[in-house]
Amino acid sequence: DAAIEWLRRRARVDLSQVAQLGGHSIARTLRPASGAIGYALVSAVHTQVLAFESSGLLTTLTGCRAMGLLTQDGCVVGVNFTRDGDEGAEQHTLRAKHTVLATGGFASDRSPSSLLARHRPDLLSLASSNGDWATGDGVKLGERIGAATVDMERVQVHPTGFVDPASPAAATKFLCGELVRGVGAILLTPDGTRFVNEMQVPK
């Protein structure tokens, strides 16, 4: 509730609509009137980031790659990183009282040594809606210093994605979200046969 209130009052995100998505038994997903929840959230939070930057309370570094976590007495005290454009492999050090890894998923890396191959090899042949950057780098940084992981096998598989007719076998697809089914879309086989209840609640 606190996060929703922050988005509404502080970030001024329109969450006026409540939608029932695929697999839901009731309408429970908050969305803006436009339906574009991803853009609404990202743009609103970005505006807040810019406000903190202009106040001097926050510095944002872009074009950087974290190379390793710094530890001292069993605690993380910062990060080593490189900057785009640096010559060679010059590393910079940033020390901090608190370090948060918020680096996204890992399903775009389908190599034999990938996190997907380790935890869900049965999914390696499926297309992904993740961008090329979703390779689990943050998870790997944590593992290198002995951090534990949980629920790594719980990889979400969406049943719907947009297929580019010019490249139907492409390994990356654009996500066709649950909202499409929630507002009435149906799933059909190539010959036009409906084969599932799109709103069925998982058991």
Image: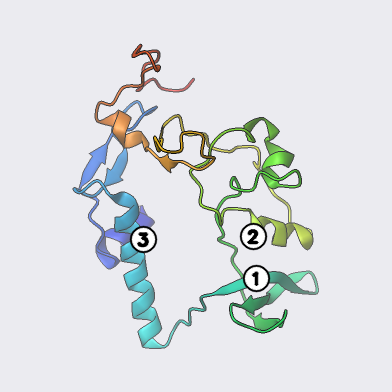
Secondary structure under tag 2 reads helix
Depth check, front residue: 40 or 148: 40
Q: Give the mark, 1 or 3, whose residue is nearer the N terminus.
A: 3
Depth order, front residue of 37/161 = 161
- Residue 32 lies left or right of residue 103; in this view the side is left
Q: Quadrant of residue 55?
A: bottom left
Which residue is under mark 2? 138
Disc 3 marks which amino acid?
Answer: Val
Residue at numbered disc 1: 66
Residue at image x 44%, y 84%?
57
- The residue under label 3 is 42
Say above or below: 149 vs 186: below
Residue at left 55%, top 61%? 102
Task: From this view, report whether residue 149 is shown above or below residue 66.
Answer: above
Instruction: Give the vertical position of 156 relative to 201 (above or below).
Output: below
Picture quarter containing residue 179? top left
Q: Distance of mark 1 from mark 3, alpha carbons?
A: 22 Å
